[in-house]
Image: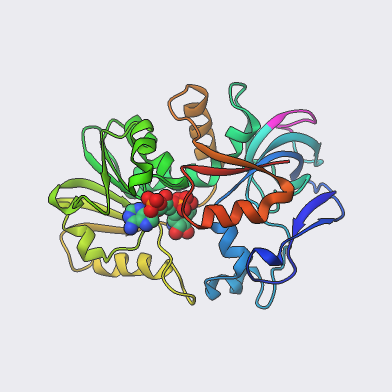
Amino acid sequence: MKAIVQHTYGGTDVLEFAEVPAPQVKPDEVVVQVRASAVDAGVWHLMTGLPYLLRLGFGLTRPRKPIRGMDVAGTVEAVGANVTTFEPGDEVFGTCDGAFAEYARTHHTKLVRKPKNLTFEQAAAIPISGFTALAALRDKGEIKAGQRVLVIGAGGGVGSYAVQLAKVFGADVTGLCSASKVEFVRGLGADEVLDYRKDDFTRDEFDLIVDIAGNRPINHVRKALAPSGTLVIVGGERGKVIGGVSGLVKAVAMNLFVKHTLRGLISLSNKEDLAVLSELAEAGRITPAIDRVHPLSEVPEAIAYAQAGRARGKVVITV
Ligand SMILES: NC(=O)c1ccc[n+]([C@@H]2O[C@H](COP(=O)([O-])OP(=O)(O)OC[C@H]3O[C@@H](n4cnc5c(N)ncnc54)[C@H](OP(=O)(O)O)[C@@H]3O)[C@@H](O)[C@H]2O)c1
């Protein structure tokens, strides 16, 4: 099969469009004929091997698994002996290791059926960013209807879901983004949109702030929190050694000493949340926002574009 592979860590030039053996199904797994995948920040982290901390889990000197891509949508090609929930031909979406390929293997619990009203491209744009936004708002943020919520980084992949999901939860939502994304974020349903180069978000007071950009000091962001407000740190690229983890650790440590609630998020994929997102998308309550679609051979261009932070919503790969 055709796949984008990497045998060393580095920039997009380490990626090769190559012919590799197709995956063989294992007893609890499903092989999916990939129709679409998507780019998220994790793809860039695993491609570059940065921050170095992640190499402890993914390979010290080179990636143990050569194919990137975690979001997947496609058609079931084969099911393992223990799998009773899917059969060949089913249209599914979810997560896997190695979706930048014609076929990918994954545990059956990481997939659900694709809603009929979604294209493969739309379905592939949901899982990783959708999980993250849902966990930030519902689990860490304990969002309630009527609350004032600020989404920092509202115009990106995670932000595009955070704005829509906060509206689903009944919040009054303000999005913070660059001027070029103001109209886009308004279109996602934000009640108010602030341009971070022009507007001072700390003049307002929010019950919940979800910081996806993660590039401001926590104490600065706290100025915009109501006295009993909650700040959830989701993202931030802080240095090559431990990267965004430092922001999460700082939030947890500071939480012991301040009245505000400060939390860091490490989101995990799970079938229950995938089902929640699938139902919301099927009902039209969230709509994947896709900036552009690249064919498999253009994964390097897609990663470079997403990493530059210019994408409005998601960058999708079609196979
Ligand atoms: N904790 C977790 O489990 C988890 C899971 C997934 C992702 N993440 C992290 O979340 C972060 C974002 O991921 P993503 O996929 O959404 O990336 P993305 O699509 O690149 O979105 C990031 C957004 O932040 C905006 N931004 C940059 N500087 C900003 C600033 N100063 N103020 C407000 N917005 C700013 C960027 O656009 P504009 O500047 O044009 O507005 C961009 O839209 C990454 O650091 C990623 O590693 C964490």
Instruction: Kindly identify the residue that appears in the image at 65 percent across and 32 percent down.
Output: 120
Name the spot of residue 274 as percent of width and height, x first: 54, 38
Please say which color scheme the image uses. rainbow
Q: How many marks?
A: 0
In the displayed structure image, the side of residue 234 where residue 198 appears, left or right: left
Name the spot of residue 113 as percent of width and height, x first: 64, 30
Instruction: Kindly identify the residue that appears in the image at 73 percent across and 64 percent down.
Output: 6
Is 19 drawn above or below residue 127 in the view shown?
Answer: below
Quadrant assignment, res 10:
bottom right
Name the spot of residue 271 as percent of width and height, x first: 56, 40
In the foreground, 297 or 287 = 297
Instruction: Kindly identify the residue that appears in the image at 59 percent across and 26 percent down.
Output: 118
Which residues make up the magenta segment? 84-91
Name the spot of residue 197 as percent of width and height, x first: 27, 54
Is 93 drawn above or below residue 46 in the view shown?
Answer: above
- The majority secondary structure of the magenta stretch comes to loop
The answer to whether residue 100 shows anywhere in this view is: no
Q: Is residue 98 magenta?
A: no
The answer to whether residue 219 shows anywhere in this view is: yes
In the displayed structure image, the side of residue 169 where residue 284 appears, left or right: right
Q: Quarter of the picture for ligand 1?
A: bottom left
Is 160 drawn above or below residue 67 in the view shown?
Answer: above
Quadrant assignment, res 270:
top right
Q: Is residue 88 magenta?
A: yes
In the foreground, 277 or 79 = 277
Instruction: Kindly identify the residue that appears in the image at 29 percent across and 63 percent down.
Output: 216
Which quadrant would the C terminus be assigned to in this image? Answer: top right
